[in-house]
Amino acid sequence: MLRILGPVDLTLTEHRVAFIGSNGSGKSTLARLVNGLVTPSRGTVEVDGIDVTEDAAAVRRRVGFAFTDPEAQLVMPTPAEDLALSLRRSGADKAQRRAMALAALAEHGLEHLADTSVHALSGGQKQMLALAGVLATGPRIVVADEPTTLLDLRNTRRIGDLLLGLEQRLVLVTHDLDLAARCDRVVVVEDGAVAYDGAPDDAIAHYRALVAP
Ligand SMILES: Nc1ncnc2c1ncn2[C@@H]1O[C@H](COP(=O)(O)OP(=O)(O)OP(=O)(O)O)[C@@H](O)[C@H]1O
């Protein structure tokens, strides 16, 4: 069997935790373990005391996952419909869901695009919409896997500010060391293992030294 991660023992309690490290080091796999998108072949992963293997549905209700490419997440023809879909478990009826969707779009500066085609949105707008959809489900924890990789500087800042300003706990996989520096804790992942775990400045210095000793 292919082994992607070695033994990893982490307890994530900080408000914002970043995973950084080389391509293919295992960051996304670690992040996906947090919401049950992948399950461990050995050992356990618990979110607020819930085992991801035993009750993946309960874990997914708590953990919202934002993908690098918002296209992976946007499934409806228009932003309003897409957000309304995210609200399907809210118990609200169709008209209420539309009103809630419009309010959520307004909160993220997207209300003027409510009924346009999702395909007409820019990359930054799509990423913002995908995040709005994740947040609309009311997660307690947000996991974002390289959410700014496809974005220009302005949108990187907007999405970064949004994520880092969330009340919810954040697990952020990123190659953007400026974003990582703004987290409370940074985990450096190398070759499927934790190479360093600690304060952002120290962790980033460790990662730089790994890459260019
Ligand atoms: N489902 C899978 N089946 C086989 N190999 C996998 C699977 N998922 C991940 N891998 C491999 O495990 C390794 C770690 O992948 P992962 O996506 O976690 O890395 P990453 O640190 O997020 O990389 P990147 O920065 O390039 O996104 C890679 O070599 C990848 O090809």
Image: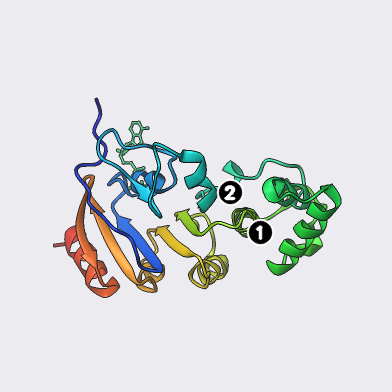
N-terminal-most mark, 1 or 2: 2
Look at the numbered disc 1 and say if its residue's Cβ is closer than 8 Å to ligand 1.
no
Asked if residue 178 lies left or right of residue 206, the reply is right
Secondary structure found at label 2:
helix
Q: Which residue is mark 2?
A: 70
Q: What residue is rendered at 27% in x and 74% in y?
A: 201
Q: Which residue is mark 1?
A: 125
What type is the residue that disc 1 sits on?
A: Gln
Look at the numbered disc 2 and say if its residue's Cβ is closer than 8 Å to ligand 1.
no
Q: Identify which residue, 18 or 52, lies in the foreground.
A: 52
> Which corner quadrant of the image does residue 103 belong to?
bottom right
Q: What residue is rendered at 21% in x and 45% in y?
A: 191
Q: Identify which residue, 91 or 144, lies in the foreground.
A: 91
Residue 6 makes an appearance in the image:
yes
Instruction: Tell me the CA gap for discs 1 and 2.
Output: 9 Å
Q: Few, some or many C-alpha atoms within 10 Å of disc 1 (few <14, some 14-19, many ≥20)?
A: many
Q: Which mark is residue 90?
A: none
Q: What residue is rendered at 28% in x and 33% in y?
A: 41
- Determine the residue located farthest toward the top in the rendered image: 1
Tell me the quadrant of the picture where the C terminus can be found: bottom left
Secondary structure found at label 1:
helix
